[in-house]
Image (cartoon, helix red, strand yellow):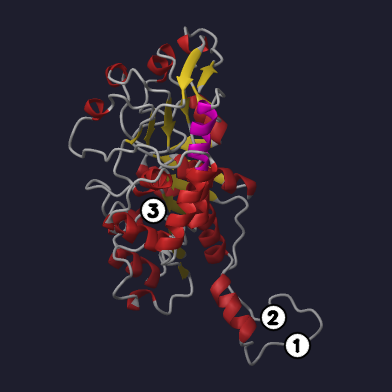
Amino acid sequence: MSRVLGWPSKKGVERTENLPRTVDTSSPERFLVAEDDVPLRLVALALDAPLDGKMKTALGRLFAGDADGALDRLRRIGADLGLAGQVVPALATGQPLETQLAGVHYLFLEGAEITEAVLARAPDLRLIQKHGEDCRNIDLAAAARRGVPVARLRRWANTSVAEQTILLLLAVARRLLPSHAAALEPPADATRGDSHYNWARVRGLRSLRGMTLGLVGLGEIGREVARRAHAFEMHILYTQRRRLPPALEAALGAEFRPLPSLLAEADVVSLHVPLTADTRHLIAAAELEQMRRGAILLNTSRGALVDEAALVAALRDGHLGGAGLDVRAEEPPRDVAGLVGLPTVVLTPHVGAGTGTELCRDVRAVLDNVARVRRGEPPTILAGPE
């Protein structure tokens, strides 16, 4: 069966994709996952790619131990969209991406660089699906000239991490754990009556309104956190290697600061950068000392971004006002003794990305775009050059 595709053009850019394109959906189609990344490989599993040991372990971890049930859920997504049994070649790791694109119709990626030269090696490409929103790694103008639509994805997993960040912030600022403990076991000297505000005499309660939130990293997750923080009327600062354009800063309501300035100004510092050799112990004793007295540190990214021994010291001597940690340097941690008995610390066991439900939603959204292209419809959240 053949489908005729047509994509709307953008003003000021010559785009060949507004010309009719015929897609033969009766012949075999080829899909390529461009990175050996677990969330992306879930897409391949939904298309009936073989399950290897690495992914079986990952499924068990991501879906609370139910790897078989997770695989069934993923397979059903592909089947529901008429995409079961597709050809998904294994990514040849260590080989240039452009050498693997011959005959590929649908390309799924997150950080892989897609240049004019790469696109020239993919004459059959019908869709580039970005597993995220930031398309700076894709030459959108070149894709437009070749009539290849680029679709973005606002990931459910990212919004879940942002929610976890706000949860930890509220739990620390509003003294959730001491309040809960006091509500279960009222102090012996608590006065009784029909209505007594703070009868447990919980100290250190703080409102988020008017606080300054410093985001170390304003990528996709950092931006999700910023959106939610604005609802609490917080002031947003950010730092990262490359400053954003002024128009984007204004749209996000965020002001740039170098890291030392951000640490000195922020009431709350939240980490949203990947773990690399350069970012390991990004927040160590010197950085903690630069933070405002009473400030709160949040980490929902990677545990080794923080020197945990230095963090414990800063919490115990009262310099920091609290910490909310979803991640640790070692998981599960062998020793939590340093954090035991600190009422200003809230810990969760790396659950920020949510459940398998969020991951399956991302897979369905991605493959729904493939199904739309096969029907001759444009994908949702279409990216394009300005």
Query: Amino acid type of disc 2?
Result: Trp
Q: In this view, does 17 lie above or below 340?
A: above
Q: Where is residue 376, by image quadrant?
A: top right
In the structure shown, which secondary structural element does the residue marked by tag 1 occupy? Answer: loop
Residue range corresponding to the magenta coloring: 364-374
In the structure shown, which secondary structural element does the residue marked by tag 2 occupy? Answer: loop
Determine if the magenta segment contains residue 101.
Answer: no
- Residue at mark 2: 199
Q: If you read the primary sequence from the N terminus, does the residue marked by circle 3 or circle 2 appear first? A: 2
Mark 2, other Cα within 10 Å: few <14 / some 14–19 / many ≥20: some
Q: Nearer the viewer, mark 3 or mark 2?
A: 3
Q: Which mark is on residue 192?
A: 1
Q: Where is residue 178, by image quadrant?
A: bottom right
Query: What secondary structure is the magenta-colored segment mainly?
Result: helix
Q: Please tell me which residue lies in front, 1 or 221.
A: 1
**Percent from the top left, x then y, of residue 89?**
29, 38
Report whether 286 appears left or right of 163.
left
**Percent from the top left, x then y, of residue 269?**
44, 52
Query: Amino acid type of disc 3?
Result: Ser
Mark 3, other Cα within 10 Å: few <14 / some 14–19 / many ≥20: many
Residue in the picture at 46% in, 47% down: 214
Q: Is residue 244 above or below residue 48?
A: above
